[in-house]
Image (cartoon, grey):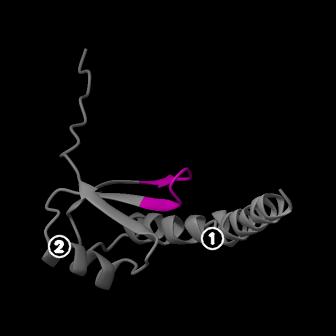
């Protein structure tokens, strides 16, 4: 009985240690990466036309970047020109169409 109790206590301590060691991504770091993306594409001279969208995915601690061409070559180009961060998750994007009403 005493051994079972000690085993349960030990397991609880290990579980708390594992949960406590989980790294939560700092919101400020996510904002910093996303701000660099926004800043780059807000400038007058942009050398990159493959971006579809970007947003912060707080639940997964990532900045999601949608690329029209999501090849390794294009991801590397984005990292070189815009920002290189482990917090970025690249996904396949789609061309956004801006409809205007000419009534």
Q: Mark 1: which secondary structure? A: loop
Along the horizontal axis of the image, is 76 left or right of 35?
Answer: left
Badge 2 crowding class, 10 Å Cα cut-off, few under 14, some 14 to 19, many 20 or more, is: some
Quadrant into which the N terminus falls: bottom right
The percent position of residue 53, horizontal first and vertical second, equals 33, 52
- Residue 74, by quadrant, is bottom left
Residue at image point 50% right, 55% down: 60
Residue at image point 83% right, 58% down: 5
Q: Residue furthest top?
A: 103
Badge 1 crowding class, 10 Å Cα cut-off, few under 14, some 14 to 19, many 20 or more, is: few
Q: Label 1: which residue?
A: 23
The percent position of residue 95, horizontal first and vertical second, equals 18, 46
Considering depth in this image, is 86 or 81 the residue closer to the camera?
86
Q: Residue furthest bottom?
A: 80
Residue at image point 50% right, 64% down: 34
Image depth: mark 2 or mark 1 in front: 1
Q: Label 2: which residue?
A: 74
Image position of 62 with respect to 59: above or below: below
As drawn, the label of residue 76 is none
- Residue 76, by quadrant, is bottom left
Residue at image point 49% right, 72% down: 36
- Count the numbered circles shown: 2
Magenta highlight range = 55-63
The percent position of residue 21, horizontal first and vertical second, equals 68, 72
Q: Is residue 61 magenta?
A: yes
Along the horizontal axis of the image, is 90 left or right of 35?
Answer: left
Considering depth in this image, is 96 or 7 the residue closer to the camera?
7
The percent position of residue 71, horizontal first and vertical second, equals 13, 68
Q: Earlier in the sequence, mark 2 or mark 1?
A: 1
Image position of 10 with respect to 73: above or below: above
Q: Gap in Å between the C-alphas at discs 2 and 1?
A: 29 Å
Q: Mark 2: which secondary structure? A: helix
């Amino acid at each position: 009985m005493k051994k079972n109790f000690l085993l349960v206590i030990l397991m609880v301590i290990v579980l708390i240690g594992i949960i406590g060691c989980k790294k939560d991504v700092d919101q400020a770091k996510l904002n910093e990466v996303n701000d660099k993306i926004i800043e780059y594409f807000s400038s007058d001279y942009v050398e990159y036309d493959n971006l579809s969208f970007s947003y912060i995915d707080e639940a997964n601690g990532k900045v999601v970047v949608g690329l029209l061409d999501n090849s390794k070559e294009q991801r590397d180009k984005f990292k070189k020109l815009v920002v290189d961060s482990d917090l970025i998750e690249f996904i396949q994007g789609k061309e956004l169409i801006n409809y205007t009403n000419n009534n």
